[in-house]
Amino acid sequence: MPAVRDGRVDAGLVIHEARFTYQGYGLHCLADMGEHWEDVTGLPIPLGAIVARRSLGAPELRRLAESIRTSVRMAWDDPEASRPYVREHAQEMNPAVADQHIGLYVNEFTAALGGGRLRGRPGAPHPGRGGGSGAAAGTGALDFV
């Protein structure tokens, strides 16, 4: 963001917690890619994903999914336990901004993903359809556990 502010580059892509702070650099939004994604696909913007091969088998995939849910619940129950890790890896060091960013993605909606919750708009690009370019190309449908 300093490079855009200082005129060394014409524009930049704001990601992660910087979406809450770019205005403090005197910058303004030309296009919101998250909003565009949601408008085109009807899906929430993906922050990331944990993936596993189907060949691990349904019981192991369910165990993995439950372990992740347990981890998230533990973090909710004791948010201070993960604070040093967050501070070490955050792009924006302001704790209030980090909390705002975490709250955007770590919530009941994301904890409940699975069971066909991600449907999107018919015919819209979808992260689980593959066939295009990128990491999911040709993989077929993704299963949400």
Image (cartoon, helix red, strand yellow):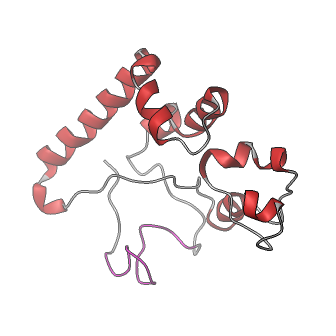
Point 74% across, 57% down: residue: 2
| 4 vs 145: above or below | below
- Does the magenta portion include 73? no
| 67 vs 125: above or below | above
- Does the magenta portion include 129? yes
Principal secondary structure, stretch drawn in magenta: loop
Point 30% across, 27% down: residue: 70
Picture coordinates of residue 43, whole percent (x, y): 58, 57
Q: Which residues are magenta?
A: 125-139
Q: Is residue 77 left or right of residue 19?
A: left
| 112 vs 4: above or below | above
The tally of labels here is: 0
| 54 vs 91: above or below | below
Point 12% across, 62% down: residue: 55
In front here: 20 or 7?
A: 7
In front here: 51 or 145?
A: 51
Picture coordinates of residue 93, whole percent (x, y): 60, 35
Point 34% across, 63% down: residue: 142
Quadrant containing the N terminus in the rendered view: bottom right
Picture coordinates of residue 36, whole percent (x, y): 71, 65
